[in-house]
Amino acid sequence: MKPFLQDIRYAWRQLRKSPGFTATAVLTLALGIGANTAIFTLVNEILLKSLPVANASGLYRVGDEVDCCVEGGFQDDWTIFSYPLYEHLQANTPEFETLAASQTNRPNLSVRREGTKTADSFSGELVSGNFFSTLGVGPFTGRVISPGDDKTGAPPVAVMSFRAWQNKYGLDRSVIGSSYTINGIAMTVIGIAPPGFFGDRRESDPPDFWMPIALEPALRRENTMLRAPSTNWLYLIGRLKPGTRIDQVSAHMTAELQQFLRVPEHQNHYAKMEDIPKQFIRVSAGSSGVNAMQDQAKQGLYFLLIVSGAILLIACANVANLLLARSSAFKQRTSLMLAMGASRGRIIRSRLTESVMLAVMGGAAGLILAYYACRGMILIAFRGAEYVPVSSAPRNAMSIMPRQA
């Protein structure tokens, strides 16, 4: 142990005597390590990470693209669906154990708690009654929306996000069971979603409230889309029964889609009967949900990944050259140490200790740089967003799994 401590003290003295070399080597390593760590963190969070839900690998999307809004007419490759079409597919696709729907866009909500005079602005999302059970997400406290809540005439209810509960209400448990007026409708907050849960997609500013789809006519009034068979505004995600092949269920859903479109009342002025055979549905892996952020950032992240790899190679080459030049300058000192009786092993060990200390300092500086670089890239990429569900450091998805109160 004593020789090891002596090597550390000696290496530290040598590095202190050469501040220019030390600063250059540490900064070079920090840039190479920091850039790569930041990019790899974003690639993992946005491109590789699954939804923070139970058994995310068992989720499958109906559709394989992303569309943000409301559409009418034919899509060819169908990604968003009307509520009547969702009901039709749900009833006639037995390959799915469960199939849930969620609103494509996230409208702003005017929310006022009972007993207060001012309303606050939040974002919301309409979901089917089996949305939370399909994703395998339970409440942090209270309960989540159930199929019984998603029926015409059921008492209006909502589930609040943990982030909104924490930031706006300071984790006040009296929120559960309280009455709120949301866009003019009295609703009861029945539960709080688990921390870290942001729904079925990773996007900036995720929902603060989830509400049953059955409330859509009351919320939109004369602009209701609920029973419009040709107005598409829902994403579908579900879980297949064991042993089901994706190509088989895709073919089955395509046949059901075309059958639905042939019904005269399900058509609109955009539709042409001769185009119905061209309409199809692809069922795709849904472990990452409806990953709009992935589609938006994929090409840029791949480019940054290549650039960061080149930076790391350049950094390694530069540090190697610096160490070779330093070794050449220390030839006389090495000869003197050998003449004084130092063993070759001791000299090699001291050089290795010096290199390890440089690596540790460069790595520590690189991690600090990576943290701020990652945050900076998120701020630039999602300008104007109040919250982006991307961590600047890897997190364990199990840490945000539901917990019963």
Image (cartoon, helix red, strand yellow):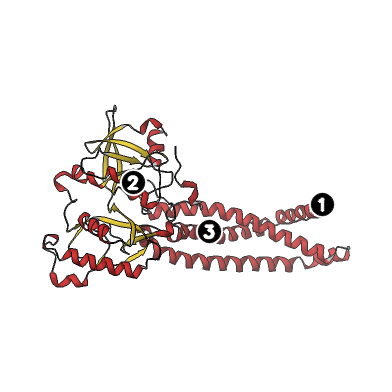
Q: Nearer the viewer, mark 2 or mark 1?
A: 2
Residue tagged 3: 37
Q: Secondary structure at mark 1?
A: helix
Q: Are marks 1 and 3 in contact (CB under 8 Å)?
A: no
Q: Are marks 2 and 1 in contact (CB under 8 Å)?
A: no
Q: Nearer the viewer, mark 2 or mark 3?
A: 2
Q: Are marks 2 and 3 in contact (CB under 8 Å)?
A: no
Location of the C terminus by quadrant is top left
Within 10 Å of the Cα at label 2, are there few (<14), some (14-19), or many (20+) other Cα atoms?
many
Residue 391, horizontal then vertical, whole percent: 46, 51
Give the residue type at disc 1: Lys
Within 10 Å of the Cα at label 1, are there few (<14), some (14-19), or many (20+) other Cα atoms?
few
Residue 217 visible? The answer is: yes
Give the residue type at disc 2: Pro
Residue tagged 1: 2
Question: Which residue sits at x=74%, y=62%?
Answer: 351
Image mark for residue 207: 2
State the CA–CA distance, disc 1 to disc 3: 35 Å
Question: Which residue sits at x=33%, y=46%?
Answer: 207
Q: Secondary structure at mark 3?
A: helix
Residue 90, horizontal then vertical, whole percent: 27, 57
Judge by depth and name the residue closer to the eye, 44 or 128.
128
